[in-house]
Image: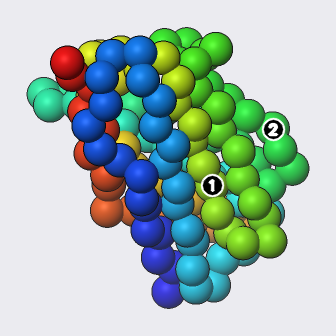
């Protein structure tokens, strides 16, 4: 059983910063990819940023240069530092964990709301 618990969402003004955290617990395979997706009202869920256990990263074009994904492998945690937030960043942000050992294993957190508004 694997669980992902996010924290750090909230309301912030345009131009502000937020940091999201996600803790993975349970039987987590050490070689994995963790990261963040988001879903705005009326839109599909989209990739924001992911990072492998080796440190390779991938970002959505819309957040490059503003968001930074990082992780602590020893603690099974992933973080998303969001700077220079824009109203279009408003969404529910979901933590994601993925690995392949013979078959794919994919897990989602419950989501945390990020609202960027003045």
**Residue 56 numbered tag:** 2
**Residue at 64% in and 14% down:** 65
> Is residue 46 shown above or below 26?
above
Quarter of image, res 109: bottom left
Residue 85 versus residue 45 in the image, above or below: above
* Residue 20 in view (yes/no): yes
Other-residue count near label 1 (Cα within 10 Å), few / some / many at <14 / 14–19 / ≥20: many
Q: Nearer the viewer, residue 13 or 41?
A: 13
Residue 78 is marked as: 1
**Residue at the location (39% across, 31% down)?**
46
Element class at badge 1: strand
The tag earlier along the polypeptide, 1 or 2, is 2
- Quarter the C terminus occupies: top left
- Give me the residue at 64% from left, 63% from top: 77
**Front-most of 70 and 61?**
70
Residue 101 image position (x, y, % from top left): 72, 69
């Amino acid at each position: 059983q694997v669980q992902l618990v996010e924290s750090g969402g909230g309301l912030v003004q345009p131009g502000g910063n937020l940091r999201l955290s996600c803790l993975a617990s349970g039987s987590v395979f050490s070689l994995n990819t963790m990261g963040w997706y988001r879903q705005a009202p009326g839109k599909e869920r989209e990739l924001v940023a992911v990072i492998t256990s080796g440190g390779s990263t991938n970002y959505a074009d819309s957040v490059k240069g503003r968001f930074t994904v990082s992780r602590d492998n020893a603690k099974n945690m992933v973080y998303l530092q969001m700077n220079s937030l824009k109203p279009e960043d408003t969404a529910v942000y979901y933590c994601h964990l993925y690995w392949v050992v013979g078959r794919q294993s994919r897990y989602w957190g419950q989501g945390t709301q990020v609202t960027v508004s003045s």
